[in-house]
Amino acid sequence: MKHQKTTQDSFFIRTALALAISVFLAIHCAPKLNNPNDPASPDFLATQLIRSALNGSLSGLNGGSTATGVKFVAVGLSGQIWTSADASAASWTDVSPGTTTNSLNAIAYSGSKFVAVGGNGQVCTSTNASAGSWTCFGEFASANMNRIIYANGLFVAIGNSGNIWSSASGDGGSWTNNATGSANNLRGILHDGSRFIVVGDSNTECTSTTATAGSWTCAGALGAGAVPFYGITQSAGLYVAVGTNGTSNGIISSASGNTGTFADASGGAMPALRDVTYANGKFVAVGSAGAVKWDADGAPPWSDASIGGTDTLYGITFGQSLFVKVGGTGLIRTSADALSWLNVSPGGNTLLGIVAVP
């Protein structure tokens, strides 16, 4: 797939370059030449075509998000996909493919391809996240794919019953099931620069440097009690995972991320938390009933910036100098500091995941 795309791009560039040169030569056959840098000049069009072809920047050739200006992509129930250039209220556009009713639980971006995953092994891919560009297929029947990231040249998706899938094709089109041996549902994943770390139900933590079959080591050693952990993030020197215990161990941390090293960092009762990120100098976790908890060093006490209401917040990301979180009934909120939140919700079904494009 990657070779085919490269070949197609080269063909289009050669064709555009040949056309531009032909136009340029035809113009220069005229008795009077013009300034190619003057927009009023007939040389100007040919010159711009040549520059565009040489730069590979003609519309559609890049295949990346810059073609549409998309900077945020959110996914959710019933195959929902929403995009935005700046996360403002009027900017959200429904680009749902309309070919699936399965939930889309999470989305990742490789730099050239968006890949969303969800219920019943649903996978949807697009090069630019525009309407009509999504290709959806059921990769693994009856398998719930809960989260996905792109790291170390791989898309890696995690799901129920200890399943982990990887796609080395770079386009999310072909997948390998790299079973971990764990029977627990897996819900949160990160790559810390050298290894993948996965968290899930019953305090499960799985680690691997390659994400390949047979490389995963799993243990139920994240904390006390059968706590399901939904998200994990890392900053310099600290790993933080969040879950839904609701009393203690709702937030845990470790200096190394190694199995058996996490300890309670909640400092008391916590709401059920579904996701966590680190950006702009702070850890920010979101969860049930509009819960938002943040802290600069990942240690108690955690400050509260909850928005209230009944909707659960399922995902949070950071991009364009904004925290952006998504949740029930199409909820989307933004904040520059994670303290005060602006409602930019477009409405619709519950949103479960979001990715920011660099």
Image (cartoon, helix red, strand yellow):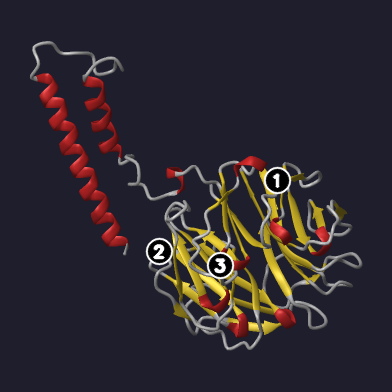
x 70%, y 70%: residue: 230
Residue at 82% from the left image edge and 70% from the top image edge:
250
Q: Amino acid at mark 3?
A: Ile
Using residue 50 as the reference point, say whether residue 176 is left or right of it: right
Find the distance from the CA under tag 1 to the CA under tag 3.
25 Å
Q: Is residue 64 left or right of residue 41?
A: right
**Residue 136 picture location, percent across and down:** 45, 68
Amino acid at pointer 1: Val
Q: Say which element carries label 2.
A: loop
Residue 139 seen in the current view: yes
**Between 39 and 92, which is closer to the camera in this rendering?**
92
Q: Which mark is residue 40?
A: none
Locate the N terminus by quadrant: bottom left
Which residue is drawn at the image coordinates 52% and 77% (left, top)? 121
Amino acid type, mark 2: Gly
Q: Secondary structure at mark 3?
A: strand
Q: Are marks 1 and 3 in contact (CB under 8 Å)?
A: no
Query: Disc 2 and disc 1: Cα gap in Å?
Result: 32 Å
Q: Name the residue beneath numbered marker 3.
A: 148
* Residue under pointer 2: 170
Reading the image, the residue beneath label 1 is 344
Among the two numbered marks 2 and 1 on one chain, the one whose residue lies closer to the N terminus: 2
The residue lying toward the viewer, choosing from 147 and 134, is: 134
How many residues crowd around disc 2 within 10 Å: few (fewer than 14), some, or many (20 or more)?
Answer: some
